[in-house]
Amino acid sequence: MAADPRVMAMVRRKLNVTWDDPETAARLEDVIATVAPALAARLGLPADHEFGEGDPDMGLLLSACLYEFSDALDDFWENYRRDLDQARLLHSCDTGDDGGA
């Protein structure tokens, strides 16, 4: 499944990829396909969660893509541990319930 074109554009900007070629496009698709479900799982979101514009976790996705593109995703998990823990906590507190109002 192809990444949302808006997400792909954001990832390209984050990675400073200014050229167009099929090999790079395929690699970026692979990066997003690897990072998105792994990040969703670490945040306690469904594996099929679609990150997009306005998503409070988009910054984490973009940073994780940068690390994965550089073959250093393991470093991302370590370097962003606090941010991931905070985001996971916020998601665990957000039940989607309006409190019965």
Image (spheres, rainbow, N blue to C red):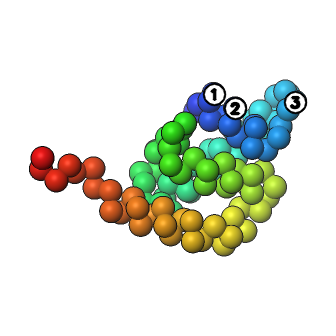
Label 2, residues with CA under 10 Å away: few <14, some 14-19, many ≥20: few
Label 3, residues with CA under 10 Å away: few <14, some 14-19, many ≥20: few
> From mark 1 to mark 3, how far is it between C-alphas?
16 Å
Q: Residue beneath label 3, please?
A: 19
Whether residue 27 is visible: yes
Q: Tag 3 or tag 1, which sits nearer the N-term?
A: 1
Vertical side of 36 occupied by 75: above or below: below
> From mark 2 to mark 3, how far is it between C-alphas?
12 Å
- Residue 59 in the image: x percent, y percent? 61, 50
Q: Nearer the viewer, residue 85 or 67?
A: 85
Vertical side of 6 occupied by 38: above or below: below
| Disc 2 residue type (three-letter) | Ala
- Counting every numbered tag in the picture gives 3
| Cβ–Cβ under 8 Å for marks 1 and 2 | yes
> From mark 1 to mark 2, how far is it between C-alphas?
6 Å
| Disc 3 residue type (three-letter) | Trp
Q: Residue beneath label 1, please?
A: 5
The residue shown at (68%, 37%) is 10
Q: Residue beneath label 2, please?
A: 9
